[in-house]
Image: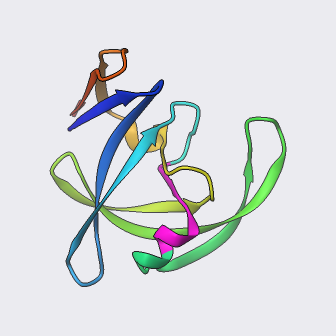
Amino acid sequence: MIGRVSDDHIYLAIEFVLANSTIAEREMVIDTGYVGTLTLPTHAIQSFTLPFLRSLTASLADGSTIVVDVYLATIRWHDAVRDIEVICLEDRPLIGMLLLDGSTMNVHFKNGGLMELVDGA
């Protein structure tokens, strides 16, 4: 999987497999400080018609807690289709460490640089 570096962020496009079997691609920021899988804002969750799973209390980096909604998404990841949990947050869409687990990431850290993410299995 190939991403890009821009404005001090690493971006990677994720393919979502929607209920009608169409593919929707969404560019997301890799956030090594986020320990979950993915976050998406409400408008993306609604447009993808992701099914609601539950609400949970989440701890933020500043030590505060919030209640967030969790949805189920199907994505293509390292050439395999996977079901994952997605947290609804209104900030930019994020890829977290739980999704990156087992992968190897090589990044050329400069504006316009490339990122390669390979399956470490």
Q: Is residue 6 visible?
A: yes
Q: Bounds of the magenta span?
A: 37-45
Q: Is residue 1 shown above or below 116?
A: below
Q: Quadrant of the C terminus?
A: top left
Question: In the displayed structure, would residue 7 be above or below residue 18?
Answer: above
- Answer with left or right where residue 20 lies relative to residue 66: left
Farthest right residue? 64
Residue 25 found in image quarter: bottom left
Q: In this figure, which colouring scheme has been used for the structure? A: rainbow
Give the image location of residue 85, x and y in percent: 48, 62
* Front residue of 109 and 49: 109
Quadrant of image for the N terminus: top left
The residue at 49%/41% (across/down) is: 96
Residue for point 30% across, 48% down: 13
- Residue at 37 percent across and 37 percent down: it is 11
Up the image or down, 106 lies above or below 60; here it is above
Question: Is residue 42 highlighted in magenta?
Answer: yes
Quadrant assignment, res 18: bottom left
Q: Would you place residue 68 above or below residue 33 in this image?
A: below
Please state the horizontal and vertical placement of residue 16, each as a whole percent of the image.
30, 64
Whether residue 50 can be seen here: no
Q: How many marks?
A: 0
- Coordinates of residue 105 in the picture (x, y in percent): 31, 25
The percent coordinates of residue 67 (x first, y second) are 76, 63
Q: Quadrant of residue 110?
A: top left
The reply to whether the magenta stretch includes residue 89 is: no
Residue furthest out toward the bottom? 20
Q: 17 or 41: nearer the eye?
A: 41
